Image: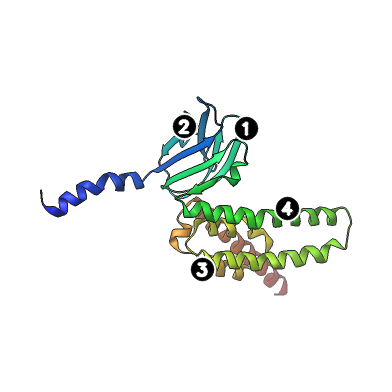
Amino acid sequence: MKPALFVFAILLPFFSLAQKLNIDATISGLADDTKVVLNDLENPVEPVAQAVSKNGSFHLAGKLEGPSLLGLMIGKDLKTAIFLGNENVKILGSVNDDPDNWKYTGSRTQIDFMNFQNDFVPKFQALNLLAQRIQMGDEKAKPALDSSIDMLQNDIDDFIKTRPSSPVSTLVVLSTIGLTEDIALLEKRVNLLTTEATGNVFGGHLKKRLLMRNLMSWGVWHSIFRRQM
């Protein structure tokens, strides 16, 4: 066997392993024979992977079309959302802790997703509270809501600029698309994203939403133009 072919033959199992999602988890306090299910939250018909725990550990193996938002269910009580691709991931935690706070290594995407949750979820919750106050007739909440949205727009831009290749940045743009009517701003954000960031189901959703926004905008201006004729 030629040296190059010999090296390739040695590395082939590692390449094959990297093309699949492999999760090795150690969860202290986890009872034996606990059922573990991993679902694609965008297509939960068939589980991505299933396992049964033993000695506080479990292994999940599956194949994803691309980076995906997944639901990890351990028994009946432990549930969390994780954002992974075909990677080798390790999870370390305890049944007494919130799964969102477990330690995840081996996935840059999951780290970005955890940063997104920590940074944005509290701000989304604050916006919802202000919107509820406005609905109840509290006019003083309107300036606070506008100010909070403006600050959030800056946070969105900062997140994307520092993570232009992350699929989570695509999720950030998609999940906040309703906060602005500025199509130019949305397109600017999308143009910052690399194909690595948009080559997933959320990238497809984002393209459709932008297309609808552009069509609606054109329809409004076309209607105004016709009325002025």
Q: Seen in the image, is 127 located left or right of residue 195?
A: right
Residue 4's place in the image compared with 63, above or below, is below
Q: Residue furthest top?
A: 33
Badge 1 vs badge 4, beta-carbon distance below 8 Å: no
* Residue occupied by mark 4: 125
For marks 2 and 1, the one nearer the N-term is 2
Crowd around label 3: few <14 · some 14–19 · many ≥20 (10 Å)? some
Residue 214, quarter of picture: bottom right
Residue 180, quarter of picture: bottom right
Which amino acid, by three-letter code, is at mark 2? Gln
What residue sits 51% from the left and 47% below the top? 104
Q: CA distance from mark 1 to mark 3?
A: 39 Å
Residue 74's place in the image compared with 134, above or below, is above
* Residue occupied by mark 3: 192
For marks 2 and 4, the one nearer the N-term is 2
For marks 1 and 4, the one nearer the N-term is 1
Residue 50's label in the rendered image is 2
Residue 225's place in the image compared with 19, above or below, is below
Residue 77's label in the rendered image is 1
Which amino acid, by three-letter code, is at mark 4? Gln
Q: CA distance from mark 2 to mark 4?
A: 33 Å
For marks 2 and 3, the one nearer the N-term is 2
Which amino acid, by three-letter code, is at mark 3? Leu
What residue sits 44% from the left and 59% below the top? 196
What residue sits 81% from the left and 52% below the top? 132
